[in-house]
């Protein structure tokens, strides 16, 4: 019952941290993206069960990516994983369909537990 996950973060280090934590929790990483454009293309190509989405990417912000996912009817569940902790940004992300918002830095357990609650 492993869930397929797409990791979106511009930091290779952070993608590795997320990947290690989720694989340890029984999740299968089926793709990684470092830009908004990749995040959109891979999400629709791979149709992951879950997407971890950073809010600050070199070409787009996560909120705009969420809008595309919502407008195009992507069925994947999205968890925002970001260092941006402004309440307005968090609320906007949740309003646009993110099911959870995890602030960096986080522990592997926090991340796995948040995904288990989806």
Image (spheres, helix red, strand yellow):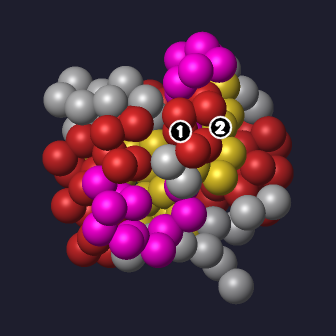
Classify the position of the C terminus by image quarter: bottom right
Seen as rendered, the residue at the extreme bottom is 1
Please tell me whether residue 69 belongs to the stretch shown in magenta. yes
1 and 2 marks in contact (CB < 8 Å): yes
User: Residue 25 location, x and y as percent?
Assistant: 74, 59
Under circle 2, the secondary element is: strand
Q: In this rendering, is residue 7 above or below 77?
A: above
1 vs 2, front mark: 1
**72 on left or right of 80:** left
Residue at horizontal 46 percent and vertical 43 percent from the top: 53
Q: Residue 32, percent across and down?
A: 35, 52
Q: Is residue 74 left or right of residue 110?
A: left
Q: Nearer the viewer, residue 47 or 97?
A: 97
- Image location (x, y in percent) of residue 78: 54, 55
In the rendered image, the quadrant that contains the N terminus is bottom right
Answer few, some or many: residues within 10 Å of disc 2's Cα (few below 14, many 20 plus, some between 14 and 19). many
The answer to whether residue 9 is seen in the rendering is: no
For image coordinates 17% across by 47% down, the residue present is 37
Q: Position of residue 13 (x, y in %)?
A: 44, 28
Name the residue: 62% across, 32% down: 91
**What number is the disc on residue 41?**
none
The residue singled out by tag 2 in the image is 101
Query: As drawn, is 21 to the left or to the right of 64?
Result: right
Q: Which residues are magenta?
A: 68-89
- Work out whether residue 86 or residue 15 is closer to the camera in this orientation and state it: 86
Q: Which residue is mark 1?
A: 93
Which element is circle 1 on? helix
- Quadrant of res 30: bottom left
Please check the rendered image and state whether residue 41 is part of the magenta-colored stretch, yes or no: no
Q: Residues within 10 Å of mark 1 (few under 14, many from 20)?
A: many
């Amino acid at each position: 019952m492993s869930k397929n996950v797409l990791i979106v973060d511009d930091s290779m280090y952070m993608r590795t941290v997320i990947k290690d934590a989720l694989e340890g929790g029984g999740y299968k990483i089926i793709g990684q993206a470092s830009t908004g454009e990749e995040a959109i293309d891979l999400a629709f190509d791979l149709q992951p069960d879950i997407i971890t989405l950073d809010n600050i990417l070199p070409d787009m912000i996560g909120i705009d990516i969420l809008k595309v996912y919502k407008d195009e009817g992507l069925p994947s569940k999205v968890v925002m994983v970001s260092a941006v902790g402004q309440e307005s940004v968090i609320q906007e992300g949740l309003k646009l369909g993110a099911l959870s918002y995890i602030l960096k830095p986080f522990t592997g357990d926090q991340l796995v537990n948040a995904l288990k609650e989806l």
